[in-house]
Image: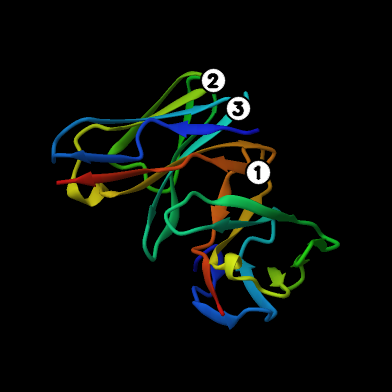
Amino acid sequence: DVKVTQSSRYLVKRTGEKVFLECVQDMDHENMFWYRQDPGLGLRLIYFSYDVKMKEKGDIPEGYSVSREKKERFSLILESASTNQTSMYLCASSLAGTQYFGPGTRLTVL
Amino acid sequence: RKEVEQDPGPFNVPEGATVAFNCTYSNSASQSFFWYRQDCRKEPKLLMSVYSSGNEDGRFTAQLNRASQYISLLIRDSKLSDSATYLCVVITSGGSYIPTFGRGTSLIVHP
């Protein structure tokens, strides 16, 4: 069975902190994605990666960076968290277009 | 103009009803289409792919109309457990399979 895990379900951070969100998949997928989901705005793509050490900006990359050192792991980094980054963060990996999501991290920035 | 549009709803239907959702897309080069289901406070999960000839999975039927650039999802004999948000996903031709998600249609099935 396909498995995508995220490091935390809930996270509370303070403004200005550096935040790491980790995502691991066990399906040997090449493509991985980070989204944020906000009420009324749907899923918005932050960054994606189609191979180790490769990354591409999505629709809303500002304020975020990513790291993909190993195929199974894709990390999202908030260099200096701000209150407008309070959101649900969803990681996904994909094969031939089908997306498999992790359970999400609800991040609150105070 | 949004690339993928859905009526947000909510669609409020009684158990046993038939309900249909549409999703329009703007890019004629779109080549792959999916419906995902998202329960409250959960991650989206693939419900079904949408094939050119249309496809059925139990009570669910998905169809694609390339000429009018929309896909549809029909749910027959609605169950309480069908209550969820249904997301339309479109992938445009290219090697990276980058999906575009609609904002979702909320379905509430009541007794």
| Alpha carbons under labels 3 and 1: distance apart | 12 Å
x and y percent of residue A103 in the render?
46, 42
Whether labels 1 and 2 belong to a single chain: the reply is: yes
Residue type for callout 2: Lys
**Which numbered disc covers residue A98?**
1
Q: Is residue A93 left or right of residue B48?
A: left
Q: Are marks 3 and 1 on the same chain?
A: yes
Q: Are marks 2 and 3 on the same chain?
A: yes
Give the residue displayed 71% in from the left and 55% down from the top. B48
Disc 1: host chain: A
Q: Quadrant of residue B17?
A: bottom right
The scheme the figure's colours follow is: rainbow
N-term-proximal mark, 1 vs 2 = 2
Asked which secondary structure carries label 1, the reply is strand
The one of A51 and B83 positioned closer to us in this rendering: B83
Q: Which mark is residue A23?
A: none
Write down the residue under mark 2.
A71
Q: Chain of mark 2?
A: A
User: Is B82 situated above or below A96?
Assistant: below
Does the residue at mark 2 contact the one at mark 3 (Cβ under 8 Å)?
yes
| Residue B37 horizontal/vertical position (percent) | 58, 58
Please tell me which residue is depicted at 68% across the width and 79% down the height of the picture.
Answer: B16
- Alpha carbons under labels 2 and 3: distance apart: 7 Å
Amino acid on which the number 1 mark rests in the picture: Thr
**Residue bearing the label numbered 3:** A30
Sequence-wise, which precedes: disc 3 or disc 1?
3
